[in-house]
Image (tube, rainbow, N blue to C red):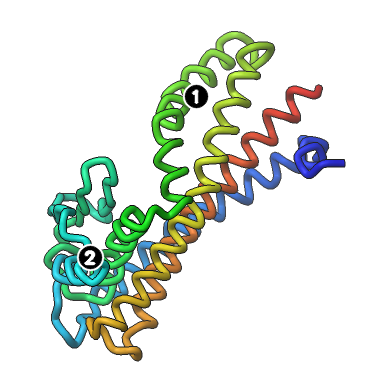
Amino acid sequence: MTTSLAFALIPTPIILVLLLLTFVFALYAQIRVSSAYNKNAQIGSRGRITGREAAEAVMARAGINDVEIAETSGHLTDHYDPTHKRLVLSSENYRGTSLAALGVAAHEAGHAIQHKVGYSMLKTRMALVPVTMITSQMLPFIMIGGFFFGGLGGIMLDIGILCYAVLTLFHLVTLPVEFDASRRAKVELVGLGIIDRDEMPGVSQTLNAAALTYVAAFMSSLLHLLYLLSMRRE
């Protein structure tokens, strides 16, 4: 029996319980991220280097000089845009000198390094982005249609399964991309002398908490997929 078939044979009630547990885990992950970030955002680094300077130093060491570092508003809106080669940091991390700010900035710089070296998982995620955006936009209409037309069935159910299959694959590929970026960030922050080794726990706590949100997203999409598959076999 293949793994996919074994998953498909999980009883629907068990899947629903797992979905509920995943929802609770996702809430926990968000609370953990906020708690870890807020705590370490209050701890200034000894070097007093800003997030922008840290990201710039990490990329410079990797020979990256064609990525723009931009500031944006919002809380934890930091991201790396490989299409336009822009590393975007929220104001609190762009200007901040805390352990949290340095960890987040170096993490995003880690994505820039992945882009430069042609990290295969990042390339795969980039290739999945267009179709993932389309499926994400389709899902609400499918679910609303299923509600008004007496539940998902036939072609609508198949489309729903296809959408969640794409989302699950995207979130699965995202896991190694995010974990690898955090690994690179930790190595470079210490290697460049931006932070001391005894400051690393604060950085690790922030990045490890953020990783939980990606795990929760993968688990949620996978269990939604399994739930629709259980409906398909009934």
Residue 220 x %, y %? 57, 44
Q: Amino acid at mark 2?
A: Gly
Question: Looking at the rendering, in which quadrant would you find the N terminus?
Answer: top right
Per the model, the C-alpha gap separating discs 1 and 2 is: 41 Å
Identify the disc placed on residue 63. Answer: 2
Q: Residues within 10 Å of mark 2 (few under 14, many from 20)?
A: few
Q: Secondary structure at mark 2?
A: loop
Compared to residue 163, the image places residue 176 above or below, namely: below
Q: Is residue 11 visible?
A: no
Q: Amino acid at mark 1?
A: Leu
Closer to the camera in the image, 47 or 41: 47
Compared to residue 68, the image places residue 139 above or below, namely: above
Q: What residue occupies the far top of the structure in this picture?
A: 149
Compared to residue 43, the image places residue 221 above or below, namely: above
Q: Secondary structure at mark 1?
A: helix
Residue 185 x %, y %? 34, 70
Q: How many marks?
A: 2
The residue indicated by pointer 1 is 139
Q: Is residue 4 visible?
A: yes
Viewer-nearest of discs 1 and 2: 2
Closer to the camera in the image, 233 or 128: 128
Identify the disc placed on residue 151. Answer: none
Left or right, residue 157 beside residue 95: right
Residue at left offset 49%, top offset 60% = 212
Compared to residue 155, the image places residue 209 above or below, namely: below
Residue at left offset 42%, top offset 49% = 122
Q: What residue occupies the far right of the structure in this picture?
A: 1
Q: Residues within 10 Å of mark 1 (few under 14, many from 20)?
A: some
